[in-house]
Image (cartoon, rainbow, N blue to C red):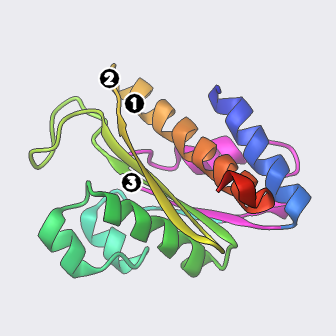
Amino acid sequence: MDLRVAAAAAVHALVDRGETLASAESLTGGLVAATVVEIPGVSSVFRGGLVVYATDLKHSLAGVPEELLADRGPVDPDVARALAEGARRRCGADWGLGTTGVAGPEPQDGKPVGLVYVAVAGPPGSTVRELRLSGPREHVRTESVTAALCLLVDSLRAVSDPARA
């Protein structure tokens, strides 16, 4: 699924359900929010987003536990989950998306370029996906956003159709 199709699918599903979305982004630097707001009708479902590029802001703005960041660093599946949950909680949304990873061009804290975690948090709980992406920085960021939006769409469908869960 391409970026715009994923964004439209997510927004339309949220509109149909009357539910809201927020994001907390690290490596994507606001690209989730920017992509979602391109879709007509989004104002009824998108609450807002946090760009928490700096590690300390992941804690102070998004509510990621300091101990988690100190023990594992910012590129971790549980950090992605905490970002999604923090976006949901801090922005008062039904659903939250979180992104963290290494876009490049250099590894970060021993984590390879292209290692990304995307997460969604919603009424039934949270889910994290690990991505191993390759290519230039722009590609890693774009594919991360697409994956986060696809994860949201999958989660919304699973809630609508419990047999898919």
- Residue 33 image offset from top left, x and y in percent: 61, 51
Q: Residue at x 22, y 70 (%)?
A: 69
Give the crowd class for mark 1: few <14, some 14-19, many >=20 residues within 10 Å.
many
Q: Residue most toward the left?
A: 110
Q: Residue at x 63, y 31 (%)?
A: 3
The answer, for residue 42, to whether it is visible in the render is no
Is residue 165 shown above or below 87?
Answer: above
Give the crowd class for mark 3: few <14, some 14-19, many >=20 residues within 10 Å.
many
Separation (CA) of disc 2 from disc 3: 18 Å
Q: Is 40 colored magenta in this rendering?
A: yes
Contact, CB < 8 Å: mark 3 with mark 1? no
Quadrant for the N terminus in the image? top right
Q: Which mark is residue 26?
A: 3
Q: Earlier in the sequence, mark 3 or mark 1?
A: 3
Quadrant for the C terminus in the image? bottom right
Please, what secondary structure does the residue beneath circle 1 have? helix
Is residue 135 shown above or below 130?
Answer: above
Residue position marked by numbered label 1 in the rendering? 140
Q: Looking at the picture, which amino acid does disc 2 mark?
A: Ser
**Which residues are drawn in magenta?**
19-47
